[in-house]
Every structure is written in structure tokens, then in C-alpha cells.
Amino acid sequence: DYRNMKFYMNISISQMSADFEQIRESLGIEKWLVFGGSWGSTLGLDYAERYAERCLGLIVRGIFLNTADEFDAVYARKSFANNPRRLQEYDTFFEGVAKYVNGPPLDPNTDSERLIRTYESRIIEGDRNAIWKFHVFENNLVEEDPLELLDPFNISDDEYPIAQSVAFFECRLFLRGTFEEPLDLLRRVSLLKSNENTVQTWVVQGTGDEVCPERFAKSLVDRLKEEGVLRKAYFVDAGHRASSDGVKDALKLCVEDFLFCQRS
């Protein structure tokens, strides 16, 4: 719970990639297929770029590259300008912590970093409403079943433990990877190819993904093509979740093609 969050304030993607490398070594696995979605695509790409020689291949979906533009795509009000429902959800999210901000009032269109830093400070203090509103905002952006949408004003005790973990780790990792120790995953794509090894990469992206918009996946696909490591890319009529029919089917095709490559 929030009382333990202070022990993870220094968490970083480089540390997490190193942790997975330790796991690989402890299991005695020479090489493995790396597979990740959403922020897992960020971690999977980071790991593959750092430890390319240990990767049989890379499958990523729902691409997030930890850039400031992607940050604004979710946490700036202007991103939802043509969607009345999303604007209402954003306003509820924004107002959840606006009164706690230090310094000048927040501008919902330009102060996404300050907004999430304010959320982080409230989350670390154990503010149940802030924790819940952060979790609900993201959950409802990706949820495809209207019956499964969460109420930002009524905390579910069953869901709250998950909300605490999601809210803290996303705030911390997003802020660190975007502003404190900026990642440059696109530039480092060149590390996926060397004289000794090429990490063939598959990309799956829902064209209706509101959390990880497709334009960022396209920028990754372009870089993968430049470096000659793209195996296949699927842009499908679907949202963010791996369980979305189009995404799920495309991921199956990626795995089948990976197995074909291994047998060839």
C-alpha cells in the first residue's frame, strides 16, 4: 500500500530491464522471446535494446515510447477536444488534484507534467480519492465494455488495491522516463541489429487506441524499417487491450510467424 511507496521512488526502466536479465540468467535461459504491451512495450523495447544478444525476437503491442508528446496525448485536455465524453472524464480527473497544486494554477492544456507530479504527491500521501481518480481515468480510457466502466466518485474496495499499485508505478515511471531521465527508444533501435544478432520485431497496434495513439506506433515502425529489423506490423481496427479481437488475432499471427522463423 501507499506506506511502502517510498521504497520504490528510485525505480527506473533500466533497473527493471536489468532485473529481467537477472531472471533470465537465474533460470538458465540462453535466449528468449520478449513480449510486451502498453508500458510493457516500453520495457520490452528497452530490454531488447540493452540485451539484444539475449533476444530471439520482440513482439510489442499498444506502443508507448515514454515521450512528452505521448504524455500530453493522455494528460492534456486539448487531446480530447472533439470528444465530449472524454472531456467530461478529463475534467473530473483534473479537478481531483487541481486544488493541491503548488505555484500558479494548473493549465489543463499545457501543464500535464505538473498535473501528474501533483497526483504523485497525493498518491504517496495515501489520498484515496486521488489514487482512485487516477486509476479510473486510465481504466475508462481503455475499457471497451460500458458495463465495466468505473465510477470516479465511488471507490471500490475490491479494486482499490490494484488502483494503488497502478497509480503509483505509472506516475513514477512515466515521470522518470519522460522528464527526469528521458528515454530515447527510437534512436536506440539501431541496437537491435549487430553483426552477431538481429532482433526481428513484430508490432501490433489498435487504430482506436486512445491511451497509446497509433501515430507513435507508426514512428516506431518507421525506425524498425530503417534498421532492417521489422518483421511485420499490424494496424488493426481495435482499442488498447490485448483482449480486443483485432489485437488478439494479430498477436496470434505474430507468435505463429515467430515460430515459423525459428523452424526455418
Image: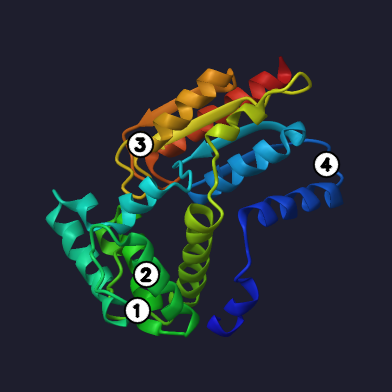
Which residue matches tag 3?
214
Q: Which residue is mark 4?
A: 29
Left or right: where 17 falls relative to 130: right
Q: Earlier in the sequence, mark 1 or mark 4?
A: 4
The amino acid type found where label 3 is placed reads Glu
In this rendering, position of residue 189 left or right of residue 166: right
**Inter-mark Cα distance, 1 to 4:** 49 Å
Residue ranking furthest to the front? 103
**Helix, strand, or loop for circle 3?**
helix
The reply to whether the C-beta atoms of the residues labelled 4 and 3 are less than 8 Å apart is no
Residue 202, compared with residue 177, is above or below; it is: above
Marks 3/1: CA distance? 34 Å
Instruction: Point out the image quarter for the C terminus.
Output: top right
Residue at screen point 72% across, 33% down: 52
Q: Nearer the viewer, mark 1 or mark 4?
A: 1
Q: Give percent across and percent down for residue 37.
A: 51, 45
Q: Nearer the viewer, mark 4 or mark 2?
A: 2
Residue with the mark numbered 1? 102
- State the CA–CA distance, disc 4 to disc 3: 34 Å
- Residue found at x 42% / y 30%: 219
Q: Earlier in the sequence, mark 3 or mark 1?
A: 1
Between the residue at mark 4 and the residue at mark 2, the CA separation in whole angstroms equals 38 Å
- The numbered disc on residue 206 is none
Q: Quadrant of residue 158?
A: bottom left
Q: What is the three-letter code of the residue carrying label 1?
A: Asn
The kind of residue tagged 4 is Ile
User: Dot 2: what SS?
Assistant: helix
Disc 4 packing (10 Å; few <14; some 14–19; many ≥20):
few
Judging by the rendered image, the residue that carries numbered circle 2 is 134
Tag 2: amino acid: Phe
Residue 11 left/right relative to 133: right
